Amino acid sequence: MPSGYSPQDELWWQDTVVLDAVVDAPPPEPVEPKSAAAAPKTAKTSRYLIIGLTATIVVLLVALAAVVLTGNASWSAAPGATTAAPTKAAPITPLGGAAPTDSATNPRAQPTTVDNAPATTAPQTTTTTVAPTTTTTVPALHDPCDTLSLGQTAKSAKGITLTCDIAGGASPAWLDENAPTAGSTCDASSSGYFGTTADGRQLLCARGIDATGSRTYTWQIPGQMSGGTHESGQPCNTQRDIVAKSSSGRAVLCQPSATSPHSTTGTWQSVPS
């Protein structure tokens, strides 16, 4: 009997209980309060739905960011659905430069720039200068020539250098390049034709007789020239007209009428060659 106890203590009259040895055991699981256990199961279900929706939104944002970074717009929110082939917008060509390419960030991108602007060509101005040339024809003295040949030179069959020129306002003709002087000799082929001196005076190559009785041809001053052109056989005024030029360039002289020598009306006659 332990000290301090007496046989009359009530403890000694109790049944003896043998207790099992105390061993280490895991702590008991906590018991939820009755208030928590009594909460409806719908609260837990709502919390799980919120967590699931949040995770879905995060995944969608990550996928959208990946699409933006890679430039691939073919991602579909419905993977099981059939989608059309992705189309890539044509790159916009900036003014004054080539179209940018995104091949560095997206190897599948192959931008193509098409220039539909019509090609322009700057207008070209061509200036043509025609220099006087020597013709290859063999004209005769006083043969007519056209205005396009003015200033051109040629050799006659006699070796005389001729120039296409206008003498005395007539039509262009092949004339002797050397300007005549009054009293100088002229060729028989020039008889009846006009020439112009270096100072612009009009001369006429006319036939004459020298002191020995030989026929000569010299440049003579014809006198007052009648205006316009006159043809052989046309009437003239003997008091007013002396010499004129025909349409062929040859000179015509106003001669008295053979039937009326005292009449003032005469006729134009060609200068004898």
Image (spheres, rainbow, N blue to C red):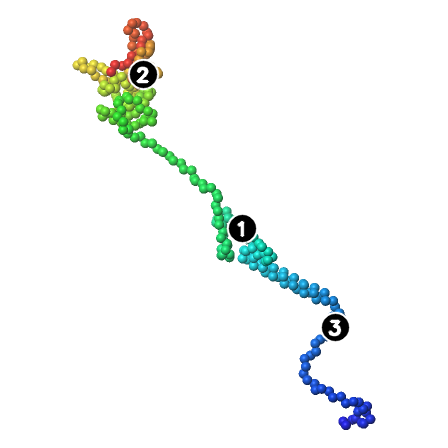
**N-terminal-most mark, 1 or 2:** 1
| Mark whose residue sits in front, 3 or 2 | 3
Q: Secondary structure at mark 2?
A: loop
Q: CA distance from mark 3 to mark 1?
A: 63 Å
Mark 1 crowd level (few <14, some 14–19, many ≥20, 10 Å Cα):
few
Residue 232, picture quadrant: top left
- Name the one closer to the observer, 216 or 42: 42
Residue 132 is marked as: none
Image position, residue 266 (x, y; %): 31, 8
At 30% across and 14% down in the image, what residue appears? 252
Q: Describe residue 70's horizontal placement relative to residue 144 as left or right.
A: right
Name the amino acid type tagged 2. Ser
Whether residue 190 is visible: yes
Disc 3 designates what residue?
33
Q: Secondary structure at mark 3?
A: loop
- Name the one closer to the observer, 101 or 75: 75
Vertical placement of residue 179 versus 11, above or below: above
Name the amino acid type tagged 3. Pro
Name the amino acid type tagged 1. Ala
Disc 1 designates what residue?
89
Disc 2 designates what residue?
246
Image position, residue 14 (x, y; %): 80, 89
Q: CA distance from mark 3 to mark 2?
A: 148 Å
The reply to whether discs 3 and 2 touch (Cβ–Cβ < 8 Å) is: no
**N-terminal-most mark, 3 or 1:** 3
At 34% across and 25% down in the image, what residue appears? 147
**N-terminal-most mark, 3 or 2:** 3
Whether residue 242 is visible: no
At 73% across and 73% down in the image, what residue appears? 32
Q: Secondary structure at mark 1?
A: loop
Residue 192, picture quadrant: top left
